[in-house]
Image: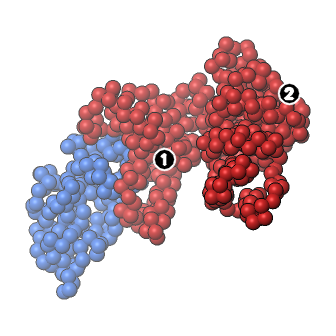
Amino acid sequence: MPRAYRPMQADRAKLRPVIGDSATKLGVRARDLKPDADGNARPDAGGVSVVSSIAGIRRRLAKRLFSPSMLPQRLSDLGKVPGANGPNSLHLFRLGEGDFISGTITEQIALKPDRDDHGTLQPAFVMPYESYRQAIIDTRDLWCSGEGDDDS
Amino acid sequence: MIASTNSAVIYAVWLQKIVDAHVRKTWDEERSDLEAEEDDRFNDLWRDLDECRQDRLWGLSSDLNTLRDRETWVDADWPPMTPKALAHEQAEAFHNKEWDRLLTSLRRPPRFLPRARVDYMRGRAWMEMGHPEIGLLFLDNAARLEPENPTYPMLVLECLKAMSAWEELHQRAEAHLRNDGTQPRLLLRIADALHLYATATATPEFYQRAIEVVDRGLEQLRASDVREALAAVVAAAFATKALCLQRLAKADDALVVFDAAIQEYPESSVLLTARGLLKQQLGRNDAIEDFEQAVHLGTPVVWPYMELARNALHDAQWQRAVSFCRLGIWRSGQPSITAALFDLLAIAQCERGDSMAEVRSAFDMARDLDPLSEEIRSHFDTFNERSMAGAKRDWKISSKAPPTAINDVYDELRVAA
């Protein structure tokens, strides 16, 4: 499975992402992927944002593509993302072990890298929007902590 | 226009948010769902900022980790640079007042400057960028890291003054005064702070307190061997004392202080100007001698030129008046003062018999620079009446500098100190 990172609010007891439709939860916002006229989610129309690696986060940081409060402050103290000052209730999660390349995450979800170390978790095929949302939520147990990963 | 205003507001709020995060360590606070939602909305606004501001905000967030001794950076993220090249980059940015460039160069490896020095320069940069409240954080930290260096607490006082944080300024000043080890250079700056505090809070008793602190500082300096190096500081301290005495309606005592100061620093054209202005306020004829000596020494202050021009006009020395006006115009930094000089120049040219077009041009400059000046308007009316009637007119030129002139002179001394 390809590897991807995403900062999200953490359920501390289980160290899993909190479910919800916001930029820092595991879920889908209409702005991430708009349903089509039939209420379906389609591939290549956007998806849930992910990043390639911790170094990739810093490369995106160098282009100022996100704010300092999008990442937990802890990552600054760890020397991974200097300047991060977001709530420490956020956690940098990772799924997968492979390279950051197009590939299957689950039967219904695929990773598609686009630009600047960024990619999206998209529907693998046309499906009802609610099914896509549920498929994203169902990845919850695939996410683990990525904060201790190598800086590469 | 609306977009840029919005961007400025978003920037200001982000700035506050980042400072708050570091000062209050908000990252460890529990976030309610509502607050988390607000965070999300706020993060969405990030893209409305221009790249320069985004850079500055990320950089600030990184730099503020110095307050907790937890600054980090990743060497691999920066292109290689030798310490010599980086030192050159920093010096160039500092001298050119390119503050964002300086802040970036201080952030990157190789880090070879002492941390206190880095935070001092960060504090200076933020002060210069119009954010003394952020400059204060870095300068306080520099003072924590290198407590024996008086420059840092001196600049802390400057930040508090710029913030009009008068009570905080007073408390900090008193805390330094309670410390027997406070260095004389800092004492003299504290006196200046107390003088401004007294004025800002309308508490004249602090003028007396400021005078006592000047005396304490000067006494300590006399016992040391660094008096020569601190000449500008001492000169400013004399001026602080004299100004406080003036505020306490002890103008004669103030004059004695200026006499003593000029005896010690006869080459200080700024002190001579200050004494000249005081003598002028006291109605003494020898004020003009101080102005002449100040001009002889090439003073950068505009007032001696203005007063000598005024004096030449009273004595009907038109060519001399024109010369002093021209010299003053080159030195003036304030539109209203430049306007007054053009006004005097126009009168001198008129009396000298210059062409009407020449005189009108000087009046136009004066009126453009200070369109609400009653005196300039009155002189211009006199000029027009004279043009029509061809008769001699009484120009009604004010006889002395405004009482606020001394503040400009004092500012000059403070900057030098």
Dot 2: what SS? helix
Disc 2 or 1, which lies upstream in sequence? 1
> What whole-number distance in Å separates the C-alpha atoms at marks 2 and 1?
50 Å
Dot 1: what SS? helix
Residue B130 location, x and y as percent? 54, 49
Q: Is residue A16 placed above or below B308 in the rendered structure?
A: below
Would residue B403 be seen by someone viewing this image from the given angle?
Answer: no
- Could you tell me which residue is drawn at 42 percent across and 51 percent down? B57
Left/right placement of residue B276 relative to residue B32 reads right
> How is the model colour-coded?
by chain
- Could you tell me which residue is drawn at 70 percent across and 23 percent down? B267
Q: Is residue B245 placed above or below A54 in the rendered structure?
A: above
Q: Residues within 10 Å of mark 2 (few under 14, many from 20)?
A: few
- Marks 2 & 1 on one chain: yes
Left/right placement of residue A61 relative to residue B155 reads left
Q: Colour of chain A?
A: blue
Mark 2: amino acid? Val
Q: Is residue B346 placed above or below B87 in the rendered structure?
A: below
Residue B291 location, x and y as percent? 75, 33
- Could you tell me which residue is drawn at 36 percent across and 55 percent down? B51
Q: Colour of chain B?
A: red
> What residue did someone put label 2 on?
B256
